[in-house]
Image (tube, grey):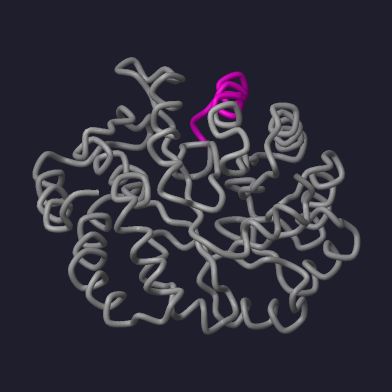
């Protein structure tokens, strides 16, 4: 798949980040992960991001990362494109990007470099160097310490033909407007706020029509139903699902730091698709919170 092929795949349909399966000793469970992908494939996500944020990329060691990408690409084959997460400092991010390419991933999502703030010049150098280390498509994720502005993205667009996507997880409307006005259709724009469904309508008005869904991991039918309603202008269904599920879901998610991942793993466990516990320093939901989530899921009906 060429970078432009990947861009086309990312331009419509629901995107998602499969959980990474761990066993009781917190080791990567390849059989469980392959079974998860087989379960999710028929629901029709346009692209799956292996070892992304919901997949706990930040807790994987490089050897495990290669195993995750290998299983994802082999399992999905030609059914759905796989994009691998990559992050950390420039040297390490290059290693992840090249490992994803080696295993046949269609592209990489360049996650924030973590912890330290960086100048625009430094961010441009980082993204450019990673882009030039591979031939596959690259999507850059504006979130955390990575806060690229419109001018920097214009430089990168001119220098890096394989930089085909921009994902936003900052929620800075002014920045998004500046980027869309300056870059136009140079990139495919992806919404990446945690539980992005509640932001979807607002982002669509800003020119960011596609998004990634975490809840696809445990309520895939509802996630697809919501996306289809949103894409087709069925605001009655969108509003109903936001009221009945997403807003109460956010109330549970917001009870703990790091719960954006933990609540998704809890949901998978509730629907008998357990991916094991989260790895420290993340912590699992408390029993009462799990029961609250269970009640929400049961109200949705079979998936």
Q: Is residue 159 left or right of residue 9?
A: right
Question: Could you say which is closer to the camera, residue 147 or residue 187?
Answer: 187
Magenta stretch: dominant secondary structure: helix
| Residue at 63% in and 77% down | 175
The verdict on residue 65 being magenta is: yes
Which quadrant would the N terminus be assigned to in this image? top right
Q: Is residue 76 above or below residue 187?
A: above
Which quadrant of the view contains residue 245?
bottom left
Image coords of residue 234 (percent x, y): 35, 80
Write down the region rendered in magenta.
58-71
Image coords of residue 65 (percent x, y): 58, 26
| Number of numbered discs on residues | 0
Q: Is residue 173 above or below residue 40?
A: below
The verdict on residue 62 being magenta is: yes
| Residue at 46% in and 38% down | 55
Q: Is residue 62 left or right of residue 132?
A: left
Question: Could you say which is closer to the camera, residue 33 or residue 97?
Answer: 33
Q: Is residue 206 above or below residue 123?
A: below
Image coords of residue 83 (percent x, y): 62, 43
| Residue at 61% in and 48% down | 111
Question: Could you say which is closer to the camera, residue 290 or residue 105?
Answer: 105
Image coords of residue 278 (percent x, y): 34, 32
| Residue at 29% in and 50% down | 219
Q: Is residue 83 left or right of residue 40?
A: right
Which quadrant of the view contains residue 121?
bottom right
């Amino acid at each position: 798949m060429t970078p432009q092929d990947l861009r086309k795949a990312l331009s419509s349909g629901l995107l998602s980040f499969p959980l990474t399966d761990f066993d009781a000793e917190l080791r990567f469970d390849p059989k469980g992960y392959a079974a998860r992908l087989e379960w999710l494939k028929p629901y029709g996500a346009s692209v799956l991001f292996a070892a992304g944020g919901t997949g706990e990329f930040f807790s994987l060691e490089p050897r495990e990362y290669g195993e995750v990408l290998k299983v994802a690409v082999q399992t999905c084959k030609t059914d759905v494109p796989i994009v691998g997460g990559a992050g950390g400092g420039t040297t390490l991010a290059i290693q992840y990007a090249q490992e994803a390419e080696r295993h046949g991933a269609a592209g990489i999502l360049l996650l924030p470099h973590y912890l330290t703030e960086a100048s625009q010049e430094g961010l441009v150098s980082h993204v450019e160097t990673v882009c030039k280390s591979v031939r596959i498509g690259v999507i850059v994720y504006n979130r955390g310490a990575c806060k690229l502005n419109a001018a920097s993205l214009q430089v990168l667009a001119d220098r890096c033909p394989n930089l085909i996507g921009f994902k936003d997880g900052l929620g800075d409307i002014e920045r998004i407007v500046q980027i869309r006005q300056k870059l136009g259709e140079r990139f495919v724009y992806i919404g990446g706020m945690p539980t992005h469904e509640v932001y979807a309508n607002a982002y669509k008005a800003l020119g960011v029509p596609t998004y990634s869904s975490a809840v696809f991991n445990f309520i895939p039918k509802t996630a697809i139903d919501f996306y289809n309603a949103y894409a087709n202008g069925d605001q009655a269904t969108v509003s109903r699902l936001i009221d009945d599920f997403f807003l109460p879901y956010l109330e549970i998610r917001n009870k703990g730091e790091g719960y954006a991942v933990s609540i998704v793993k809890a949901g998978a466990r509730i629907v008998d698709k357990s991916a094991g516990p989260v790895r420290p320093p993340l912590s699992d939901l408390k029993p009462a919170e799990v029961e609250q989530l269970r009640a929400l899921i049961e109200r949705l009906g079979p998936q």
